[in-house]
Amino acid sequence: LLVDDVPGAPGLEGPCKQISIFMSPMDVHVNRAPCDGTVVSVEHVAGRFLAAYNEEAPRQNERNEIVFETAFGKLLIRQCAGFIARRTVCRVPPGTRLRQGERFGIIKFSSRVDLYVPSEARVGVKKGDRVLAGETILAEMTGMKG
């Protein structure tokens, strides 16, 4: 797990926090909605297959970028293929309403998922933590206005 402040992300305005979750071939690779919201856009970007931990992977690797509108503002979920995992699957088109924890996609074998949240969000995980889909609270956005 990696947590970082970044100046921006595709589909979002202004600075945000990036939460990167790295998965091994032994992990479950189902991706779930981080909170209730609506899919605004889904963009598949062709690219390379660098190792998921490479800091250039989110910008250069094959990926799906899903912009998600929530009560707290927009989020970006990036499914990033890696050296071994070369297939990301997003099963929801724009306009789909998702509930927190609902499945929206999968990454076959191992790779990474990057979640970009507003900079005001209170991140509840730190570098090196192990997270569980649908169980670990990555960030809290209560009290924020979208």
Image: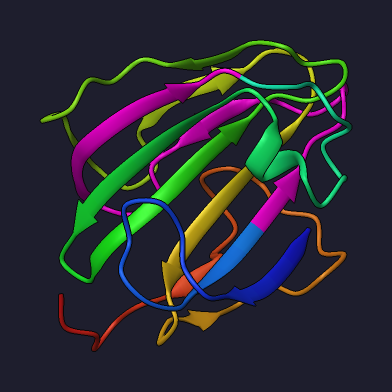
User: Can you say whether 103 is above or below 46 in the image?
Assistant: below
Name the residue at 68% across, 54% down: 20
Work out which quarter of the rendered image holds the N terminus and state it.
Answer: bottom right
State the image quarter where residue 6 is shown.
bottom right
User: Can you say whether 133 is above or below 43 in the image?
Assistant: below
User: Can you say whether 29 is above or below 70 in the image?
Assistant: above
User: Can you say whether 75 is above or below 79 in the image?
Assistant: below
Q: In the image, residue 28 lies at what x, y percent?
A: 70, 26
The number of numbered discs placed on residues in the rendered structure image is: 0
Left or right: residue 44 versus residue 145 is: right
State the image quarter where residue 42 is shown.
top left
Name the residue at 45% across, 78% down: 15
The structure's colour scheme is rainbow
Q: Return the residue nearer the eye: 62 or 101.
A: 62
Left or right: residue 30 versus residue 22 is: left
Q: Give the range drawn in magenta.
A: 20-46
In this view, which residue lies farthest toward the left? 95
Residue 71 among those drawn in magenta? no
Q: In the image, residue 21 lies at what x, y percent?
A: 71, 49
Left or right: residue 109 versus residue 44 is: right
Q: Return the residue nearer the eye: 57 or 25.
A: 57
Name the residue at 81% across, 64% down: 129
Q: Return the residue nearer the eye: 24 or 52.
A: 52
Name the residue at 46% across, 45% down: 77
Q: In the image, residue 19 lies at what x, y percent?
A: 62, 62
Q: In the image, residue 143 lies at what x, y percent?
A: 24, 89
State the image quarter where residue 92 is shown.
top left
Residue 42 among those drawn in magenta? yes
Q: Return the residue nearer the eye: 97 or 59.
A: 59
Left or right: residue 122 versus residue 127 is: left
